[in-house]
Amino acid sequence: MLLSIKRHRLRDRAINRSDFKDHFSGHAQSYAKYRPNYPDKLFKFLSHSAPSTDIAWDCATGSGQSAISLKTYFKQVFATDASEQQIANAKKLEGIEYRVAVAENSGLATGSCDLICVAQAAHWFDLNQFYKECDRVSKPDCLVALWCYQLFSISPAIDELVFRLYSQVLGDFWPAERRLVEDGYASMPFPYKPLATPKFSMTKDWDLNTVMGYLSSWSACHRYQASTGESPLTSFSEEMSKLWGPSDQIRSVNWPLHLKVGVVK
């Protein structure tokens, strides 16, 4: 049974959206369809490193990719996102409670969480306020895990073409916060006692149409089209097809993950 808000003493707190930078609601369906899932080994590692496996908070859950994996290892998962559209497209499962809430004001009970994780989203936050919220909702020795991924790797020729799309065609359409992703969160402030982590990566076997669908979910593609009235993928897709070969050909797509994991003391 889904544990109730009353049982977990989740507080009714006002959701302040004045500073929420919504880059994904307009294409929440494509985001849910094409974004890759994170490796199970990552969540197994996090569950073994957390003080217990009662409650995990998946902050900025998007369409719930991490929340679904966390449910394998935690009794209860609270998955929050400031976008109602993202939450609407999340897969509903017993043991996962989805809530519309900003990262800095979760509404979770004080001292309730064993794990707080943020996948590919912490760069959008007001980090000072988010870390205050982490301190508030954490149990002693709660684990905070932030991770991101950059461009995928398929082959040298395809990778070069995708990098040109990313940097030259879409360069001016990426928000400034994207720079934190580009350096793998190395420059992101992180106030918690660091925990050494293994290396993790996402790997998918995709055909050309799936890769193009994934690229179409980039927020910069939507921003480019809104500004110019044209898709940035039109000419790109022609070049990509020449490099790919038959569209149903399967290729391995790989994204290394960059993690910051620490313990709240």
Image (cartoon, rainbow, N blue to C red):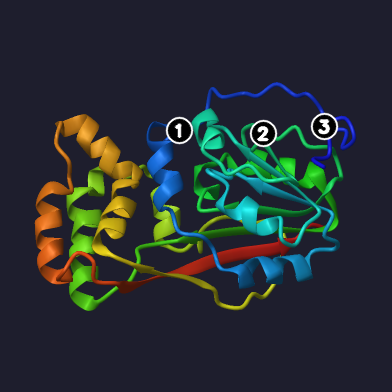
User: Residue at the spot x=15%, y=33% of the render?
Assistant: 228
Amino acid under disc 3: Ile
| Residue receiving disc 2 | 99
Left or right: 85, with 178 as reference point:
right
Q: Is residue 9 visible?
A: yes
Q: In the figure, residue 262 lies in which quadrant?
A: bottom right
Q: CA distance from mark 2 to mark 3?
A: 10 Å
Amino acid under disc 1: Asp
Q: Quadrant of the C terminus?
A: bottom right
**Residue 238: x and y, percent?**
9, 57
User: Residue at the spot x=62%, y=23% of the render?
Assistant: 16
| Residue receiving disc 1 | 22
| Residue receiving disc 3 | 5
Which label's residue is closer to the chain start, 1 or 2? 1
User: Mark 3–mark 1 contact, CB under 8 Å?
Assistant: no
Which label's residue is closer to the chain start, 3 or 1? 3
**Residue 120: x and y, percent?**
50, 53
Q: Nearer the viewer, mark 3 or mark 1?
A: 3
Amino acid under disc 2: Arg
User: Residue at the spot x=87%, y=45% of the render?
Assistant: 111
Which label's residue is closer to the chain start, 2 or 3? 3
Q: CA distance from mark 3 to mark 1?
A: 26 Å
**Residue 78: x and y, percent?**
72, 43
